Amino acid sequence: MKRLLFSLICCFLLVFSSKIAAEDNKLSSEQLALRSEVVTFLKEEGFMPDIDSDGDIVFKIEGTKYIVSISDTDENPMYLSFYASFSYPSDYTSDVVLMASKELNRYKGVKVTCYDSSFRISCDLYLRDAESFKESFYKVKSQMSLVQSDILDECKNVSSGLGSISISEIPFIITKLEVANIDNDGTIIHDYGSTIYEYKTQYLKPRITIKPYKTSGSVKLYIKLYKNNELKKGSSSPDDYSYSDTIEINGSSSQTFVLSGWGSDTAGHWPAATYRFEIWYGTYCLGSKTFKVI
């Protein structure tokens, strides 16, 4: 019996270590070095970081689990996410928390993202080594704590109608916004969420996932595309926007729409820079996405 138990434990450890090794194999030597530097820094600061089965750094602060995840796709610079997840406040519905998160994302230095039963507070960094993470760690952690407490106040404002955004005034909330690079025929060159390289850029095309507050009907949206904070406009662009598009909501369940793209047939149209899509309905920004072309 003891021998069988020992064999089972060995098998478990072998599978677990093999999974971590597989995740490590996805990271380049530079990305692994970044992860190692972050782990060393956290240990020096008195935390007890570990590497989980996904290859992410996991540690706790006052009982709350925090995660540092390093992307295996971005190399120069590298991409790091620092985040923690929290349960929804018991007194408010997910819709109210979602509206509150949109309000907090207007002015906070970290991002609030809502999921089915929890919300995440995160900070995303592009960096070449661990120094930027070390310098910003405590400032970001402090901001995350402020947002965690502020979300209760924003939920109260949304519920009482005191917030700047009211559920009754908008047709839906954008729960996810992604960007792809496509050609004129609609063929995807760089898929949604993947790295976009400047020499192949043609049309930058947003895709939105929404949670409707009206069950059906046409909704006209206005889109802003910024390059390094400069609003891109053409000769036929609406005032203060890059272009517009219309979607047809069908039912009250979550739905995904691919919006019109913006660009040119010529490869290399968009140079390396920081870009941002904003989706507007009237005077409300329903969602935004900042991304890089490298």
Image (cartoon, grey):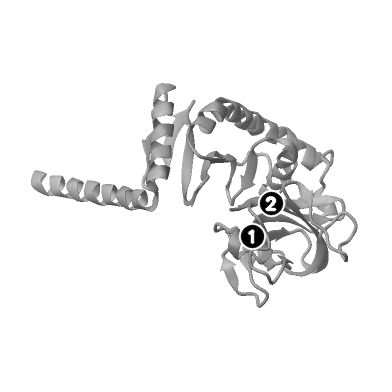
- Foreground residue among 288 and 225: 225
Left or right relative to 142: residue 260: right
Give the spatial CA distance, label 2 vs label 1.
10 Å
- Foreground residue among 87 and 112: 112
Residue 128 in view here: yes
Q: Are marks 2 and 1 in contact (CB under 8 Å)?
A: yes
| Amino acid beneath label 1 | Val
- Residue 100 pos. (x, y %): 72, 42
**Residue picked out by circle 1:** 179
- Residue 14 pos. (x, y %): 22, 49
Q: Residue at x 82, y 64 (%)?
A: 244
- The numbered dot on residue 235 is none
- Foreground residue among 158 and 257: 257
- Residue 86 pos. (x, y %): 56, 39
Q: Residue at x 80, y 68 (%)?
A: 246
- Circle 1 packing at 10 Å, graded few (<14), some (14-19), many (20+), is many
**Residue picked out by circle 2:** 275
Image vertical order of residue 106 relative to residue 177, above or below = above
| Amino acid beneath label 2 | Tyr
Label 2: which secondary element: strand
Left or right relative to 78: residue 150: right
Of marks 2 and 1, the one in the foreground: 2
Q: Residue at x 90, y 57 (%)?
A: 239
